[in-house]
Image: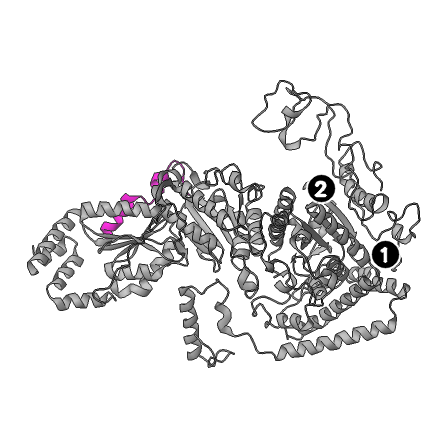
Amino acid sequence: MTPDAMQALGVRRLCKLAAQLQTPRARQARDWSRGCATGLQQPPLLAVEPGEQGTKSMNLFQAINDALRLSLETDPSAIIFGEDVAFGGVFRCTTGLREKFGADRVFNTPLSEQGICGMAVGYASSGCTAIAEIQFADYIYPAFDQLTNEAAKFRYRSGGQYDCGGLVVRAPCGAVGHGGHYHSQSPEAYFTHTPGLKVVMVRDPISAKGLLRSAVRCKDPVVFFEPKALYRTSIADVPVRDYEIPLGVGQIVRSGDDLTLVAWGNQVNVCLAVAEMAEQELQASCEVIDLMSLLPWDRDLVMNSVRKTGRAIVSHEAPRTSGFGAEIVASIQEHCFYSLEAPVARVTGWDTPFPLVHEAYYLPNKYRMFDSIKQVLGVHDDARKFVKSVLRDHVVAQL
Amino acid sequence: MLCGQAYDAHSLAAAAAMLATRFEWRSGLRAAGRWSGAKPPRRHWSTSSSTTTGPGGADAVPVSSAGSWEQEAEPKQFKYPGAQGSKFSAKFNVVQAKFRTPASTFRVLSEAGDLVGSAAAPASPEHAPSRHIALAGRETVSQMYKHMVQLRVMDEYLYSAQRQGRISFYMTSAGEEAAVIGTAAALKDTDPVFAQYREQGVLLWRGFTFQEFCMQCFGKGADKGRQMPVHYGSPELAFHTVSSPLATQLPQASGAAYALRLARKGSIKLPASTSGSNGSKKGRSAHSTAGPEDMIVTCFFGDGAASEGDFHAGLNFSATLGCPVLFVCRNNGFAISTPTKEQYRGDGVVMRGLGYGMDAVRVDGNDALAVEYTVREARKHIVEHQVPVLVELMTYRVGHHSTSDDSSQYREANEMQFYNERADPLRRLRAYMQRSGWWDDEQDTQYMQDQKRELLTAIKAAEKEPDTHPMTLFDDVYHELPPSLVEQRKELYNHLRSYPHVYKAAVHDMHV
């Protein structure tokens, strides 16, 4: 097949690549243009060592419960409160904690989100640890003032004299299959626009436990989102020991060369699924990054990956316009412009309220992502397979 | 108003009046030194004695763990979980607001500065000490008056400084000096305070210096120039930094008070920084040490802030969770321009305490003695019972809302004049002191002059202080500077180096 024919198939990038691969100099030039030195070390996958105590199979709510238990055990000032937490919580995250630590430290509050967060700010400002639960992230808005105007600015406005660093607000977020617009939202972007807050969203039990332990110990207020769809469905062998995963650090959960997928929360799992699909059907190797922390976020991790792959898709459940994906895409064009081989794409929820019976049509599922991957790679399925096999033969011949 | 007299068959007046009644009970009839030895009145809001199990009552199937029906002598007795004390009545009983008698306003000083009521009556042997209200003595009264003078002087001069363009903004306490200073005097100096914004008197009482006030107003204070003038804060004096959003401090005060409650019970241990490290800088010895077992949180707000959702949340949380917190409402008649008659329909703010199951008292906020006494008693009650109390201080905002406001646009000058002449808290307390032979005109003139001199010195000194360094604007956003802010800081630095003529600050001493 001639280059012209390949171009006709819409695979300009692969043509270019094939051309460059022919000489070592060209390869060097390519590496340089991507802004990373040849032989750049990849960040290792973040693995949590189980340690002597080994692991235990837990789902997400059990891992959260485990982290909460450890927090109450190790921090005598820590308390947990919110609506219905006393009997274990509607998602069972606080099961058994009241029995173990007493009604003073694990208790129900009246039904008022602004009251819960306001109380948490005041309690934390006394130098203590407040772990507040908002029953659904959809109901966090009455507390918006307390979180964005109060918690976020508590240290700043006092010139560092006061702070409410011991504050964590946990909130179940995201799609669940039957939640409609008031039980499915992902409001993380509202909070990422607020200096002073830290924002986290978790993807599985292992990361959740470590991130929650970090959030509780963190000296800044943290808004901690837990995708409710994963509470029972996401199961893993979670280390029994007390461990932390640092805030502000992302994780490469799957390595790849052709394309970078950036996500957080349950969308990471969608990315992993589509990466597998792309591997199988397109022989495309996707690198999947879980940001975990959205504020502050691990920009270097994403940029290094995009410089390597030259292509990126950012995906989130929340609506597209002013979603946090916009921030990432803007940063990519700012810092990786000369490494990009294609426009950076976003695969997100639509700019509508979260629907009920049409949830399947709203979600950025793996098929929508797959479609986007094909566009970003600029290749038709069959052509991609074909060209890739040609290329592989070609490289082997060179060696 | 005495117990019983106010209980009217129709309405909730009885229960509503209970607040005022109970307070008078304790001060007048029962118990010196105790908030209420009195049992709550036996009568219910409805005077009907007929009870019934209600429709389907006897046969009703109890639901879940809803109530205490099982514990009743007659297990078939049916009660709804939301109002266990309520009896069924065949009488159609409308909870009518309009027949309710407004709660009385407690005062011990007349406008002319004379003692009134039981405060005026000498303690008689047969009633002593219960008939007599133990008012603050000479030392405390003198201190209160002096601080009220200081506050007025400071307000006058800093207000003028704003008018001269030397500071950007100011808010005076004019007319409300007794409300704030009287409260501060009755608290322990280590009690954490969550203020609204017009309570600089508390800081003044605790020893915040003129210099510190001026530094904050000039943007050079401990807040590093981050907040508008009057947004003071001092961990050393247990005074939480003021924030502009209204009423946010109420649920926060509940949270801080809950920490005190747990510490008192031994459930948690508080860090040392919770209360002021030294209490007062003036070292009032009686106030200098306090543990959580003897501390309360005090939270100020206004009649306008009481309309915010956070007001409801704060009171409801503190009542249900048993938080030792004193809510102090300065009802000064205005929220900027909005008069109280457009702010609420009920009987002020004091009555709302009842809705939360919280004791509440209404006081003449321009009567420093009454305020001090009430807060002292309330404080005692809170410490002993670990419950919140609401105090409504009736007062009048003589000044504009702030320097950005012109109140002549929405109120008559003579109205202001009327309150200024009739209700001025300084004149009232001074008259009382002079009548007691504790103070005279000469002392007064001298003291005021001294304060003015000190304040002018402080203003000049603050003006001369160097400006807060612009590169500090990235500090304190987080505990540690995240990479994004390190980068942005550098970006600003480079920009300042390129355009030095545009900005006031020099870049040569900046470190990045």
Q: Nearer the viewer, residue A196 or A129?
A: A129
Would you name the residue on which mark 2 appears? B354
Q: Quadrant of the N terminus of chain B?
A: top right
Q: Secondary structure at mark 2?
A: helix
Q: Is residue B44 left or right of residue B118?
A: left
Residue A59, image x, y percentages: 38, 40
Q: Is residue A176 visible?
A: no
Q: Is residue A249 visible?
A: yes
What secondary structure is the stretch in magenta mostly built from? helix
Direction front: furthest residue: A52
Pinpoint the chain carrying mark 1.
Answer: B
Mark 2 or mark 1, earlier in chain: 1
Specify few, some or many for label 2: CA neighbours under 10 Å numbering under 14, 14-19, or 20 or more.
Answer: some
Name the quadrant containing residue A234: top left
Q: Is residue B179 left or right of residue A43?
A: right
Q: Is residue A273 left or right of residue B391?
A: left
Q: Which mark is residue B109?
A: 1
Q: Nearer the viewer, residue B51 or A383?
A: B51
Numbered range of the magenta stretch: A354-375
Amino acid type, residue under disc 1 in the picture: Leu
> In 3D space, how far apart are the residues under numbered discs 2 and 1 (Cα atoms)?
27 Å
Residue B46, image x, y percentages: 76, 30
Q: Which mark is residue B301?
A: none
Vertical relation: B295 (above or below) B41: below
Amino acid type, residue under disc 2 in the picture: Leu
Q: Secondary structure at mark 1?
A: loop
Residue B393, image x, y percentages: 75, 53
> What residue appears at the point 52 percent right and 47 percent down from the top-left corner?
A132
> What residue appears at the point 85 percent right and 56 percent down from the top-left corner?
B109
Vertical relation: B170 (above or below) A53: below
> What residue appears at the point 63 percent right and 59 percent down from the top-left corner?
B275
Specify whether residue A373 is painted magenta.
yes
